[in-house]
Amino acid sequence: MDTSWEVHWGSEKVIIDPWLLGSEVDYFQWFNEQWHTTEPITLVEIEKPNFILISQSYSDHCHEETLLKFAKDIPILASPKAYKRLKRTFSENRLIKLPILSKEGFLEFNGLKIATLDPRRCIDPIYYAHVICNGNDAIFYSSHGFSLDSKQLALLKPLNMKALLTSFSEIRLPSLFGGKVNPGLENVNQLISQLNPTYITNTHDEQKTHSGLVMKMAKTNYPDLMDLEFKSTEILTFNDYQFRDIY
């Protein structure tokens, strides 16, 4: 739940941002601690992945307690800031830093092509997006939404965007703590118009149990998926742990 995904694509099995145990803490418990409201799937129910992708450096994406439970021979591909954090816990032989698409192009890995999209911010919060390609087909994963610039759009335009995974919720904090950390439906509609995905699903929208200063200050809006409809793009919902076949 929230924003942990298992993707099977051809012969590849990929786990994205697994947080399946305990709570997630950002900096200090008094600052922000959150728990799933829906019990996560257990690790024994998950097939061994070919690799794990970590999109962000924050604990609800980069959850060391969960990662340590996976087999030690599974590569971990991480965005630049997540890579920096994970070096404190995992061997650099196991870690692979993902390239920034607009600067370094794609990483070719196990028959897939993968890259990070940089939000072009110099200070936190920095929320990356990621694109995973199998041939010319692609998945775009932006757990906190994303604003594409013209260069990024040009690089993505040749791709057949099969699926867009992005947050539908709007979460706004005081500017000192990051401002609008989830941009809501306005950004969803913008990404749909830019990427023209065949399917869209929401991610990072679980209304988690929480304590600490951050969520006390947050203003939130979680849209009802039953009320939503997008032109030319089909919504996929995941209210359980069943797979959805998009081919």
Image (cartoon, rainbow, N blue to C red):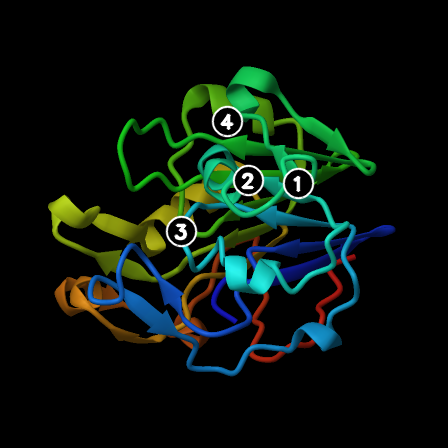
Disc 1 to disc 4, C-alpha distance? 15 Å
User: Badge 3, how many Cα within 10 Å: few under 14, some, many 20+?
Assistant: some
Q: Nearer the viewer, mark 3 or mark 4?
A: 3
Residue at the disc numbered 2:
130
Give the secondary structure at mark 3.
loop
For marks 1 and 2, give the CA distance: 7 Å
Q: CA distance from mark 3 to mark 2?
A: 15 Å
Q: Quadrant of the C terminus?
A: bottom right
In primary-sequence order, the first of circles 3 and 2 is 3
Instruction: Read off the residue under disc 4.
Output: 153
Question: What amino acid type should be assigned to the residue bearing mark 3?
Answer: Tyr
Question: Quick check: 109 left or right of 236?
Answer: right
Which residue is located at x 67 percent, y 32 percent?
159
- On screen, residue 112 versus residue 56, left or right, reads right
Question: Circle 4 sits in a helix, a strand or a loop, which is it?
Answer: helix
Q: Name the residue beneath numbered marker 3.
A: 58
Is residue 222 in sight in this rendering? no
Give 247 or 218, whichever is nearer the viewer: 218
> What kind of residue is marked 1?
Ile
Against 225, is 71 above or below?
A: above
CB under 8 Å between discs 1 and 2: yes
Relative to 13, residue 115 above or below: above
Secondary structure beneath label 2 = strand
